[in-house]
Amino acid sequence: MDEQDLSPYCAPLTEAVELIGRRWTGSVLRAVMAGRTRFSAIAGAIPGISDRLLSQRLKELEALGAVERNVTPSTPVAIEYTLTPMGESLIPVLLEIERWAVKWLVPAVDARTRRLRSSS
Amino acid sequence: MDEQDLSPYCAPLTEAVELIGRRWTGSVLRAVMAGRTRFSAIAGAIPGISDRLLSQRLKELEALGAVERNVTPSTPVAIEYTLTPMGESLIPVLLEIERWAVKWLVPAVDARTRRLRSSS
């Protein structure tokens, strides 16, 4: 890629990266895309998230149009969250971030841990 | 992709997505990858960023190992920021997020604006 062709600022990129980078949002999307559709199943998949924050993130993703809330009028009422086409289109994006993380972040964290251990 | 094959939680993904999604970080990386290497050039490329926050984000990216600070001992001293191999490897990741944003976020924002205009 020719660096000269790239504009130095892109508002949609900034908006998108900060949107999916909001605390817990990436984890919520991953849990839903892995088939955890019930609130309790999503909550159970993400270590440390509170019900209040999960509820807030799901509402934000619903308002954005990435997640759909489906209510089945059974007894008790069954509520399921699924990805919309917009949400589905985030799957390759998140997997691309994940490949980068596994290649670059995991070794960096490992190296930091080794340095801390050897200096203590 | 088989959804059953995907684990519902991935710590490196969560870390990476929240790291590059931190306010301004995506914009700073984009400006540097587009060839804005001086502090003032990076600051000039990003609407609304303060010098203090740009300085903080550059330090974080340096500590992470994604950005390198190069000092040329000229008069005045020339300081340039460049991407390390780790930082370079973020380019396709950010471009993937950007493609998603242009396809899905821009139309969503446009539709919202039209709805607000027609209801006012």
Image (cartoon, coloured by chain):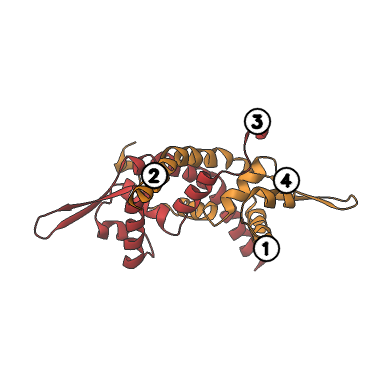
Chain colours: A red, B orange
Separation of residues labelled 3 and 1 (CA atoms): 30 Å
Q: Residue at the top extreme?
A: A1
Mark closer to the chain start, 1 or 2: 1
- The CA span between labels 3 and 4 is 15 Å
Pick the residue in front: A79 or B4.
A79
Q: Nearer the viewer, mark 1 or mark 2?
A: 2
SS at circle 3: loop
Eyeballing the image, is A3 above or below A110?
above
**Which residue is pictured at 20% across the width and 55% down the height?**
A79
Q: Is residue A79 above or below residue B84?
A: below
Same chain letter for marks 3 and 4: no
For marks 1 and 4, the one nearer the N-term is 4
Mark 3 vs mark 1: same chain? no
Q: Which residue is mark 2?
A: B108
Find disc 4 in the rendering and name its residue: B37
Q: Residues within 10 Å of mark 3 (few under 14, many from 20)?
A: few
Which residue in the structure is indicated by mark 3?
A2
Instruction: Describe the element under mark 1 as helix, strand or loop.
Output: helix
Q: Nearer the viewer, mark 3 or mark 2?
A: 2
Q: Are marks 1 and 2 on the same chain?
A: yes
Q: Which mark is residue A81?
A: none
Marks 1/2: CA–CA distance:
33 Å
Q: Is residue A42 visible?
A: yes
Q: Amino acid at mark 2?
A: Ala
Q: Position of residue A10 (x, y in %)?
A: 56, 43
In which quadrant is the C terminus of chain A drawn?
bottom right
Chain of the residue under the numbered disc 1 shown in the image:
B
Residue kind at label 3, given as amino acid type: Asp
Which residue is labeled 1 in the image? B52
